Image (spheres, helix red, strand yellow):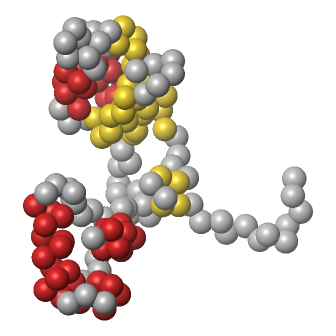
Amino acid sequence: MEEILELLRQNARLSVKDIANMTKKSEAEVAAIIKSLEDDGVILKYAAIVNPEKSGETKAKVFAEIQIQVTPEREHGFDALADRIYRFPQVKSLYLMSGGYDFKVIVEGDSLQDVAFFVSSKLATLNGVRSTKTSFILKKYKENDIVYVQDERDRREAQA
């Protein structure tokens, strides 16, 4: 099962036949394992990773990282507040953190103003939120092991 998961992590477009050949299992075995992984919620989704700078999208989305300090709820801790936060469609990722703040949230909007409005009118006003700190993401170099930039510089150039 782990071997099949790793192959799908590397390339979710592999066919059952290809995976069977790579793992020395029958196609029926591989199909059953994949179905079981999907049914059990181990595999949640298959998705294409798109480079926004090369996709031809006419209007780029704006992403921001928001650090949130909260007061955990009695008897529910951080979970109840996390539940309210991750339900917003603008929220793409939500993490409980150690250190100087409690939650790290990645949000998406159509503009800087759109993200700022979301933070000030939705996130900051939630009961339990003590403070927010927003940093806008200016450029993605690498995310989830995917490198978005190509180094086209001639390595023989003198280093500055």
Q: Image height check: is 53 above or below 97? A: below
Q: Nearer the viewer, residue 54 or 64?
A: 64
Please indicate, yes or no, whether residue 109 appears anywhere in the rendered image.
no
User: Is 63 left, or right, of 155 in this rendering?
Assistant: left
> Whole-percent x and y of residue 156?
85, 71
Q: Nearer the viewer, residue 49 or 33?
A: 33
User: Is 148 left, or right, of 131 in this rendering?
Assistant: right
The image quadrant that residue 104 belongs to is top left
The image quadrant that residue 66 belongs to is top left
What number of labels is visible?
0
Q: Residue at x 24, y 64 (%)?
A: 46
> Whole-percent x and y of residue 114?
31, 29
The image quadrant that residue 122 belongs to is top left
> Whole-percent x and y of residue 81?
23, 20
Q: Residue at x 52, y 40 (%)?
A: 138
Q: Residue at x 15, y 79 (%)?
A: 31
Q: Residue at x 45, y 54 (%)?
A: 144
On-image quarter of the N terminus:
bottom left
User: Is 90 left, or right, of 151 in this rendering?
Assistant: left
Q: Nearer the viewer, residue 137 or 55?
A: 137
Q: Image height check: is 51 above or below 14? A: above
> Whole-percent x and y of residue 108?
33, 38
Please indicate, yes or no, whether residue 144 appears anywhere in the rendered image.
yes
